[in-house]
Amino acid sequence: MNPSTRAEKKALYLLITAIMLLGLNPFFFMVAIGEAVQDEPSEQASASTSTQPSGESEKADGERRPWWEQYVTFSGDLRTALALNIRGNRNGTDRTNILPVARVRGGVTLSPTPWLTATARLAGFFDEELQGLGFRFSHRRTIQSGDVTFDELFLMLKPYEFLTIKVGRLQTEDPPFELDSVVLDSLSRHDSSGLDVDWTDGIYMLIGRSSSFKLHLIGQVNPEEGPTNGVGVRGPLDFMDGASRVTYYVGLEAPPLKPFTQLAADVTIIPQALRPLGLGTDTKEDVVAFTMRGAADFPLQDGSKPLTLHPFTEFGAMVMTPQEKVLGISTSEERAGHYAFVMGLDLKHLGPGSLGFQFGWAQAGYLLSPDYPNNAWSIETRYKVGIAKNTVFELRYRHRQDIAKLVDALERQTDDNFLARMTVKF
C-alpha cells in the first residue's frame, strides 16, 4: 500500500474513533450536571430469553407484539476504543502507537421451550489495518481486521433448576471466571477480553442454585494450532499430542456471604502440553494450575448507592513450569517461578461511576493467564461510568514492565497504555 494512502487511512480511523468516543459522548456534559447513570449494562441481560405462554402478549405500554417475540431474542454490543501505547523495547528503542479499534457483535437466541435455547452470534474486529470485509468460520484464536465469524454458536439445556449445560462455541467470561473488580481480568480464563474476538469450543456445565455453592465444569477443545482463547498461549506449550486437545476446567463458587461479593477457586489442566525443555523436545508434562479469587464490599455511608470500598485479590500457582533458559530469563536449567497474584481496591459509586486501582504480578513460569503476561508486573487505574442506559464509558492508564531482563535484551520492556473505551449494548 502507498505510504501516503496508509497514513490517510490511519488518520481517518483515528478521526472517526475520536468522534465516536469524545465528540458524540455525552459523558462530560452528564457528569457536569450530575445525571450520569451509575448502573452498568448487564451481560446477563443481553443474553436473556423469554418463556412466556404462546400467543400475542402486551408490552408495558399496552401495545400488542407478535407471538414470535416470545421465542426470539436479539442482542449485541458495539465497543470502540482509542489507545495510546508507548513502548520501551528490549533493544533500547522506543515506539509509540495510536490504536483506534472497534468490535461489533450481534446475535439471536431461539427459545422453543423453557429448558432449551439455541444461540448464534457474529463478531467482527476492525482497526487501521482494515482491507475489506469477509465472513469465515474461524478456528484460530484471533481473527484479522475485517473478518466476521461466529463467536457463539451453542445449545443450552436446563432440564432442572440446578443444572445448566451448554454445548458448542461459548463465551466463558464474567465472575466467577474473572476477578470481581472494575478491571474484570483473570489469572485463569477470560474469553473476548478487551476488544478481542475469541471463544471456547466445547461443553460447559453449571451445577447449583443461585443461593448455594456452584460447580463449573468445562471441557475445551483445542486445535493443533493451539487454544481458541487466551488459556495456554504463552511459553513453550504444544498441542500436537492428542491428549492436549482438551483443556479441563473445574471451578467452585461460594454462595453470597456478606461482606464478600466473590469467593471462588478453580483448577485448569491441559494434559501433555508443556515442553519444559523447549519446543521441539520430547519431554512432555501436564499443565496444572490453581487459582483462588475473592472480593468484598464495605460501605462507608448509608443510602441506596453509598460510597463503598471494594478490595479484591487473586492468587495463582502453576505446578510444573519450563526451565529458566527456555524462557530466556537466564542460562539456568532450574524451573521458572510458579506464582502470580493480583490485588487492588475499587471505590464504587465514586461520583457517577467507580474508580479502580490494581497491581498484578506474574512470574516467568506462570503461563496460563489470558490477561497477565508471564514475567511481568503491572499497575493500573481505571474509571468506569454508565453514561446512559446500556452504555458504559471507561478511562484507563496502565504501566507494565518485565520482571527479569531477558538474557539477550539490553533493557526490560515497558508499556505505558492510555485507553478511552465505550461499550453500547443493545
Image (cartoon, helix red, strand yellow):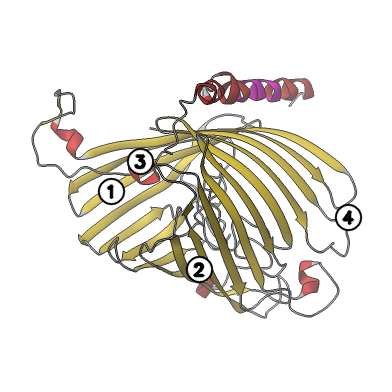
Is the C-beta separation of discs 3 and 2 under 8 Å? no
Q: Earlier in the sequence, mark 4 or mark 1?
A: 1
Question: Do tag 1 and tag 3 residues touch (Cβ < 8 Å)?
Answer: no
11 falls in the magenta region: yes
* Main secondary-structure element of the magenta-colored stretch: helix
Q: Relative to the observer, which residue lies in front, 190 or 378?
A: 378
Q: Position of residue 108 (x, y in %)?
A: 32, 39
Q: Which residue is mark 1?
A: 118
Disc 2 residue crowd, few under 14, some 14–19, many 20+, Cα 10 Å: many
How far apart, in angstroms, are the residues tagged by discs 3 and 2? Answer: 31 Å
Q: Which residue is mark 2?
A: 245
Range of residues picked out in magenta: 10-17
SS assignment at label 2: helix
Q: From the viewer's perspective, is residue 93 above or below residue 421? A: below
Quadrant location of the N terminus?
top right
Residue 91 picture location, percent across and down:
89, 51
In-front residue for pair 368/425: 425
Could you tell me if the residues under marks 3 and 4 are in contact, i.e. CB atoms within 8 Å? no
Write down the residue under mark 4: 411
Give the label, 4 or 2, closer to the camera.
Answer: 4
* Horizontal relation, residue 229 to residue 119: left or right: right
Residue 298, how many percent across, how many down?
48, 55
Magenta segment includes 250: no
Contact check, label 4 and label 2, Cβ < 8 Å? no
Quick one: label 3 or label 2, which is nearer the N terminus?
3
Q: Which mark is residue 46?
A: 3
